[in-house]
Image (cartoon, helix red, strand yellow):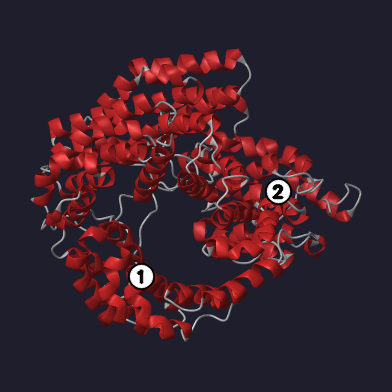
Amino acid sequence: MKTVPPADTPDGRMLARYTRGRVAGTVADALAEVSWEKREPAVEDHPPRQMLRALRRLALKGAAATEEDCYDLYDCVALGTGRLPSLTTAALPFVVDLACDPHMGARDTLAELLVSLAAVAAGARPGAVDAGWHEEWRRQHPRIRALLADPVPQVRREALPLADGVGVLLERWHAETDPAVRLPALLALGSAAAGSGEAADVDRVRAVVTGVLRTGGPVLRVAAVHALAAFDLPESVRALDVLVRDLSDPAVRPRFEETWYVPGFASAFDREDIVAASAELFEDDPRTALSFAVRLVGAARRTGDALLCRAALDAGWRLLVVRPSAAAALLPLAGELLADPDAGVRYRAAHLLAVLGRPAAPYADALAALLDDPGGDEYFEGTVGDHARWALTRIGDPRALPSLVERLYEPYRDGCCRAYGAGDPRLPEVEDVLAPLGAHAEALLPAVRRLLREDGVGGSLTCSFLGVLKEWGRAAAPALPEAVTLLDDTRYSVGAVNALVAMGPAAAPAKAAVRASVVVDWPGNHQHVAWAVWRLGGDRDTALRLIGEAVQAQEEPLYGPVDLLGEFGPAAARHADRVRFLMEHGGTWVRLRAAIALWSITGAPEPSASVLEEYVRADHVLADTAQGGLYGSFHDALRTLARIGRVTPAVRATLRTVRAADRRLSPYRDYRAFLQDEEIRAAIDRVLALP
C-alpha cells in the first residue's frame, strides 16, 4: 500500500509547508502541487483525479458550497470500504483547511466527514489504513481540535465526536452557551464516561449529570437521564419519574425540536423520537420499559395528548414483540384505547389486539364496532377497520368473515406494491390472515376463486391465494379449475401443483394436467412434479425411481430431494443407506431433512431421533436477534419428534427452559413474530405432552 511522500521529497515538503499554513495562495492553488495520480484510491471507480476535482470544486465555491457539493468528496473517500488509502491521506490536510476556513459554506458537513474518517481509522482491519495516515492526523490535530471551539454552533456540534475524552468534553460543556450544542455535549459526556476506564472521569461526569437533573430545564433533564443511562443504567432507572414528567408535559413538547440535535443529523429530534429513544434505554430491563410505556399512555390520556399516546403505544409494541410478559399490561390498555378519539391511537390498539389473538376475545364486541372505521395513521397502511377485522379472525369471531377477502385484496387492486417498515404495526400478508381459516373455507372460497379468475396471470395475489388453497387442503377442492388454469405459467405452476396435491382425491382428475405443467427447467422442479403426479394417483414407482436416483447421484451441498424421498415411506427402503449417509455427513440443512426421511422410511426412532434432538437446543431460539436463530430447524425437529412419539429427559428440560423464557420465539420483529411464536410454543407443548 502506498503512503504519504517522504519529507525529503518535493511532495513531502509541499504537504508539510501546507499543513503548517505557510503556503501562499488558495487551496485550489495548493492542490495543483500534489502528485495525485501517484495515490492509491479507495475504489477504482473514483480515481485520484476525481478527488482533485472534488476538492477544487469545494474550494472554488467557497461560501456558496453546500452539503451536496461534498457528495463527490464522500464518494472518493468511500467510507463504506473501511479503508484509508494514500489518496485519502493526501486529501486530509485540504479537508481540514476547508473545514476550518470561515468563508467555507459546507463546514459542518466537512467536520462530519472528519468524524467519519476518524471512526474508520479506529475500527479498520489490519492493513486497511495507509501507513502515513496516523502521522498526518497528528499533524492536523491542533486544527481539528480547534473546530470544537469554532464560532459556528453547527460546526462545534458536528465536531463533538472528535473530542479526546472526558476532559476535553467537560471543557466544552462548561464553555458552551448554545442550547443545541450543550445538549449533544451532555450526551457525549455520558458516552465518554461509559468508555473511560477511569473512576475519576465517571465521577466528574456524574457530577455534571446530577447537577442538570437538579437544576436544568426539562429537555436537558431528559438528556441527562440518557447520559446517565450510558454509564449507570440502574441509576437512570431511578430517574424514570423525570422522563415521564418532562416527556408528558405538553408545554415542553416544542422545545425538543429546538435543541435536541446530535452530530450526523441535520434535523432536530422531536419529542416522539425521544420517547422511542428513551424506551430503548431500558431494553434490557423489560419491567422498567413496560412501566415507562404504560405510564406515558396514562399521562397522555389525562391530557388528551394523542401524539404522545401514539409514541407510547409504539414503545409498548416494540417491547411486546420481544417480551410476551408485556401482554398482561398492554392487553387491557389496548382494549380501552379502541374508543380513543384519535384514529392513530385506535389503529395501534386494534393492531396490538390482533397480534395477541385469542387473549383479546373480551374485546371482540368493541372490535366488531370498528369494522367500518376508516381512520388510519399517516405513516402506516390500512385502516382501523382492517386491523379490527384481522383481530376478529385471530379471535375466531365469524363477524370478521363478510367482505374479509375483498378487504384484504383492496391494497393490491391497483397493482402497486405495498411499502412498509418491517418493525411497524403493518397489515399482515393475505396468506397469513386466510391460511388459518380453513374451517371457514366454504364461506371464503367464492371470493378467493373470483379474485383468482380476475387477477389471474400476473396478478399481485395469485401466489398468495395459491398458498392459501394449499393450507386449506381438501376444503379448497372447489377451486380446482382455477388452480389448473395456472399450471402452464412458470411463475405459478409449482404453487398450483402444491395446491392441487393438498386438495386430495378430489384433484385426481388434474393428474394429466399436472404431468404436463410448465415449470422452470430445473431438475428439482421436474422431480417435484413427478412426486405430485404420484400423490394425485399416478405411478408411484416412476416417481420413486426419478427422485431416488437424484438423491443417489447428486452431491453437496443439497444432495437432491431427500425430503421428497421420505414421502414414500417404506417403499423407499432401498435408498435407506444413502439417506443415512446424508444424515451422518451432510450439512446442517441436509442432516435434519435426512433424519426426518430416514425415520419415515424405516419407522425406527433411532438414529433419527438422536439427530433431531441436536436441533432442539435453547441457543437455536434464544439467541440475540443480531446472532440470528435456527427457528425453522428447531420447529421441524419438534414436529417430527412429536410424530415419533419419543422424547428424552434432556430434551424435556431444554423445552421447559425455552417455554419459560420471556422471549418471543422468532427472528421477526413485526406481527410474524407472534404467529411463529404461537406455532413453536404449540409444538413444544405437543412434545412435552408425550409420555
| Amino acid type of the residue that numbered disc 1 sits on in the rendered structure | Gly
User: Residue 318 placed where, x, y %?
Assistant: 35, 40
Q: Which of 457 and 84 is in front in this view?
A: 457
Rendered image quadrant of residue 441: bottom left
Tell me: residue 271, above or below residue 405: above
Secondary structure at numbered mark 2: helix
State which quarter of the image contains the C terminus: top left
Q: Residue at x 17, y 46 (%)?
A: 346
Count the marks: how many? 2
Residue 26 showing in the rendered view: no
Q: Nearer the viewer, residue 375 or 145?
A: 375
Tell me: residue 335, above or below residue 577: above
User: Residue 90 placed where, x, y %?
Assistant: 75, 53
Mark 1 = which residue?
504
Residue 632 showing in the rendered view: yes
Q: Residue at x 63, y 69 (%)?
A: 548
Tell me: residue 113, above or below residue 191: below
Mark 2 = which residue?
93
| Amino acid type of the residue that numbered disc 2 sits on in the rendered structure | Pro
